[in-house]
Image (cartoon, rainbow, N blue to C red):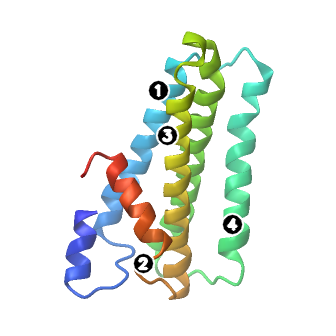
Amino acid sequence: MHIYLLYFGAGIDVPYPSWADAAYFGSALSFVVGAYFLAKSVGFGIGPKSKRFSIVPIVVPIVIIGISAFVFLYNHQYDTSQPLTVFLDFGYPVVEAIYISLALIAYLSSAKLLGGLMKSAILILIVGLIVQYCADFSFLYGSSRGTFILGGFLIYSTCVHTLSQGHQ
């Protein structure tokens, strides 16, 4: 986030891809690890005993990625001379779909732990992850079409994302 402020201060409206994406993509990978350990802490393992939980990690990413691909790829031309942009355009939605599905698994599994005491906290986390996904998708969509502007949903979700990371 702080790297982006330097770009905006230098008059670069849409710094994508930039050095900031190295750290930001790393944070998305960290969210996957965190969501996995959260799901594991509430009883989910690699081989879940319940059939209803085993479908979630397959269906949720497919639905999220499918909707994203349909909206994002509609009338979109990739510039193959920019391989980092192509990688990030696909990488962000895929990684974010994975951590949302892991958080959903944690939510579904948490009913067994302490009588569902953690369910509301995990639900708040899921809402935050979905808001972050929507913000990232709107940024990717707008920057790929040259229509990105600062403001609106992105400002709101950036504040939510920043506060969720402990920056106040």
Q: CA distance from mark 4 to mark 1?
A: 28 Å
Q: Residues within 10 Å of mark 4 (few under 14, many from 20)?
A: some
Determine the CA span between mark 2 and mark 3: 24 Å
Choose mark 4 or mark 2, whichever is in front: 2
Which SS class for mark 1? helix
Of marks 3 and 1, the one in the foreground: 3
The residue at the point 24 percent across, 52 percent down is 168
Residue 101, located in which quarter of the rendered image?
A: top right
Q: Secondary structure at mark 2?
A: loop
- Give the labeled residue for mark 2: 151
The Cα–Cα distance between marks 3 and 1, rounded to whole angstroms, is 14 Å
Give whichever of discs 2 and 3 has the lower sequence position: 3
Where is residue 71 shown, x and y percent of the image?
70, 72
Mark 1: amino acid: Phe
For the residues labelled 4 and 2, the Cα–Cα distance comes to 24 Å
Amino acid marked by disc 2: Gly
Looking at the image, is 78 positioned above or below residue 68? below
The kind of residue tagged 3 is Leu
Using the rendered image of the protein, determine whether residue 46 is visible from the camera's viewpoint.
Answer: no
Q: Which residue position holds label 3?
A: 125
Left/right placement of residue 64 relative to residue 133 reads right
Which of the two discs, 2 and 1, labels the residue nearer the N terminus?
A: 1
Q: Circle 1 is placed at which residue position? A: 37
**Secondary structure under the numbered disc 3 in the rendered image:** helix
Q: Mark 4 or 3 closer to N-term?
A: 4
Residue 60 left/right relative to 144: right
